[in-house]
Image (cartoon, rainbow, N blue to C red):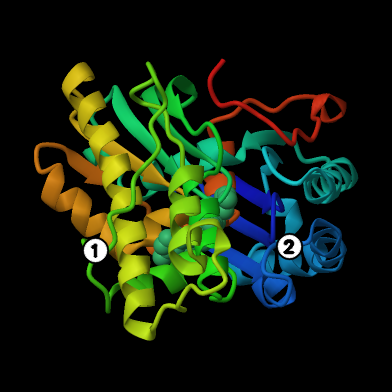
């Protein structure tokens, strides 16, 4: 079965053709990073305008690179949420229009679930169910018990910023360009992770939940001085590296500690990672060092950031629904 996937939840317009939920024939991603960089983050109105212009050319390219025509497509899968509502409308309405005009069945897919599916798609044979899904993206941070594809139980989530959002905000404090994650990773390579004693927030009585806003404030005070004292000496280049390394280490070790608790409690054998933050190489090496008892399954690098291949892949496992019943959802849970 050939599935055409469409993704437009945030600042990437993407289309892909995937065979039988696994074999990627094409995965075209038109990134808007350059457009939003001068604003230090995604501007929803600009993102929408760019999606409108990019959507059909990106779909055409995905079909062309896969060497198929629309008439050969068996199903269209579109990211229905969560995401920026205007951006979602553009992808969803484009998908509905194509589905109607070409008579192709349509399915809606949850973007966060698709991030986890990206790892399943990369390494299906290694997964031992139930396993622990770890979502680390720009908009979400969650620990999910995965019984099977489509059957999930939420274990923990963030109460404020998502981890990727914290990376982006810390990067902004350090005057690094958007998106901040890769910039922090790079700066951290030249710093000492133990230099600044930053603290991670904890949620009382909720050992699996996250809070990233406190550490972000810790970084802000380190840069600007407690209560923004006027005589505060600016950080030198080496101190900026130490701060990036200290923040990155604390944030990742907090995630790893909580994964460790879940693994012990539920005896998970496999960990499934998903979301843009999982392309961080330091995270991958920390997981290897601190969680040697479990098999960590990572998405291939081309599937870590937002892309339509993961949408098409997951769409293969869905049952088509009437077009009119598909609604864009800015918030959309993966657990019933
Ligand atoms: O999954 P994603 O593409 O979008 C959402 O669904 O939110 O994730 C984007 C996030 C951004 O916050 C970006 O800063 C972060 O992933 N990111 C990273 C790295 N590369 C991207 N965070 C840490 N280290 C990286 N190397
Ligand atoms: Zn995403």
The location of residue 13, given as percent across then percent down, is 70, 61
Q: Is residue 300 visible?
A: no
Residue located at (86% from left, 68% from top) = 53
Q: Is residue 321 visible?
A: yes
- Give the class, few, some or many, for how many residues have Cα within 10 Å of label 1's Cα (few <14, many ≥20): many
Residue located at (18% from left, 41% from top) = 295
The location of residue 324, given as percent across then percent down, is 87, 27
The residue identified by callout 2 is 59
Camera-nearest residue between 164 and 173: 173
Q: Residue furthest left?
A: 293
- Quadrant, the N terminus: top right
In this image, 23 relative to 13: left or right? left
The location of residue 96, given as percent across then percent down, is 84, 42
User: How many numbered badges does the structure rendering display?
Assistant: 2
Residue located at (49% from left, 24% from top) = 150
In this image, 137 relative to 261: left or right? right
Q: Separation of disc 2 and disc 1 at Cα? A: 43 Å
In this image, 17 relative to 189: left or right? right
**Rendered view: 240 above or below 222:** below
**Rendered view: 134 above or below 304:** above
The image quadrant of residue 244 is bottom left
Camera-nearest residue between 72 and 197: 197
Camera-nearest residue between 333 and 185: 185
The residue identified by callout 1 is 193
Earlier in the chain: of badge 2 and badge 1, it is 2
User: Mark 2, mark 1: which one is toward the viewer?
Assistant: 1
């Amino acid at each position: 079965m050939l599935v055409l996937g469409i993704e437009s939840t945030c600042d990437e317009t993407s289309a892909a053709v995937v065979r039988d939920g696994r074999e990627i024939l094409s995965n075209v991603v038109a990134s808007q990073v350059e457009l939003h960089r001068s604003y230090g983050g995604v501007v929803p109105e600009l993102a929408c305008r760019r999606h409108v212009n990019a959507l059909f050319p990106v779909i055409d390219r995905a079909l062309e690179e896969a060497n198929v025509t629309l008439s050969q497509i068996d199903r269209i899968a579109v990211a229905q949420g969560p995401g920026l509502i205007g951006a979602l409308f553009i992808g969803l309405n484009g998908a509905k229009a194509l589905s109607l005009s070409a008579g192709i069945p349509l399915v809606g897919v949850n973007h966060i679930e698709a991030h986890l599916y990206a790892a399943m798609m990369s390494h299906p044979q290694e997964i031992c169910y139930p396993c622990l899904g770890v979502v680390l993206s720009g908009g979400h941070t969650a620990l999910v018990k995965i019984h099977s594809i489509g059957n999930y139980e939420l274990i923990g989530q963030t109460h404020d910023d998502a981890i990727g959002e914290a990376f982006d905000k810390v990067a902004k404090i350090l005057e690094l360009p958007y998106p901040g994650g890769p910039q922090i990773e790079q700066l951290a390579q030249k710093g000492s992770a133990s230099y600044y004693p930053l603290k991670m927030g904890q949620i009382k009585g909720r050992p699996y939940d996250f809070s990233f806003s406190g550490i972000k404030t810790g970084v802000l005070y380190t840069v600007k001085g407690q209560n923004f004292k006027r005589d505060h000496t600016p950080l030198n280049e080496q101190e900026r590296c130490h701060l990036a390394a200290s923040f990155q280490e604390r944030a990742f070790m907090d995630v790893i500690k909580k994964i460790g608790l879940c693994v012990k409690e539920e005896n998970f054998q496999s960990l499934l990672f998903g979301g843009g933050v999982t392309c961080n190489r330091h995270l991958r090496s920390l997981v290897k060092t601190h969680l040697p008892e479990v098999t960590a399954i990572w998405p291939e690098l081309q599937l870590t950031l937002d892309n339509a291949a993961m949408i098409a892949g997951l769409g293969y496992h869905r049952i088509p629904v009437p077009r009119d019943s598909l609604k864009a959802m800015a918030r959309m849970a993966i657990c019933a």
